[in-house]
Image (cartoon, rainbow, N blue to C red):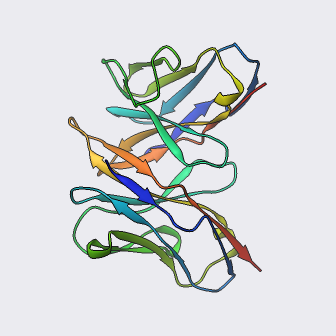
Amino acid sequence: AQSVTQPDIHITVSEGASLELRCNYSYGATPYLFWYVQSPGQGLQLLLKYFSGDTLVQGIKGFEAEFKRSQSSFNLRKPSVHWSDAAEYFCAVGFILTGGGNKLTFGTGTQLKVEL
Amino acid sequence: SAVISQKPSRDICQRGTSLTIQCQVDSQVTMMFWYRQQPGQSLTLIATANQGSEATYESGFVIDKFPISRPNLTFSTLTVSNMSPEDSSIYLCSVVAGAYEQYFGPGTRLTVT
């Protein structure tokens, strides 16, 4: 069965500092990988995705993530964090369903706090 | 992408009652999903709802407790039946659009007293 591990429950960074959120997955085939962000009281917003091809993917809001098959990782990065980035971040792995669509398994999330 | 709305946005319900949550999408989609997010937890898939067929439930979730309807390609409902305080959660619907991208509604925050 597929699984996702986000080792860091909470992370605090200073505004302007760089950020890396870790994500490790377990999946028998080539995974479809996603990062979502959930701001307080909001639904989930898709930041970026990896399906195939270039292992460094760019997303919205200046985020990027790198797929490393040898490490089973898909870490999220941002070079300079803004106070508005404070939120909870979820990594997810998906597999394709017969008939289309995909089924997601989420990690436990990383709560990001940004200090001004 | 897809724009998804949910009703109600939040509710406080008494133990033993039922609540039906509505999910509306701005475009026709084949698959819709219902998730539960318990306080301080991650998202857990409840069921997958295809139009014209019975919903497929994940382990630990049963139709009697979480009946789902999918009358057309833009709408679905999830009912939380015979509620207990343990059902207090955020319930989210999602759809697949584009290349296997799932988009989520804003969620329904349910508190059971």
- Does residue A15 lie above or below A53 as drawn? below
User: Up-down: is A27 above or below B28?
Assistant: below
Res. B71 in view: yes
Is B46 on the left or on the right of A51, as rendered?
right
Residue A33, given in percent of the width and then of the height, sits at 35, 60
User: Residue sitting at 51 percent across and 22 percent down?
Assistant: B77
Residue at horizontal 70 percent and vertical 74 percent from the top = A114
Q: Quadrant of residue B95?
A: top left
Q: Nearer the viewer, residue B41 or B91?
A: B41
Identify the residue at image location x=37%, y=70%: A73
In depth, the one of B60 and A22 nearer the eye is B60
Which image quarter holds the C terminus of chain B? top right
Across and down, in percent, residue A11 comes to 64, 72
Could you say where residue B106 lies in the image, as x and y percent from the top left? Answer: 59, 42
Residue B105 image-quadrant placement: top right
Residue B28 higher or lower than A81, as above or below: above
Residue A24 placement, left or right of B44: left
How many badges with numbers are in the image? 0
Who is closer to the viewer here, A24 or B33? A24
**Quadrant assignment, res B9:** top right
Q: Residue at x 44, y 44 (%)?
A: B2
Residue A86 vs A66, above or below: the answer is above
Residue B1 visible, this orientation: no
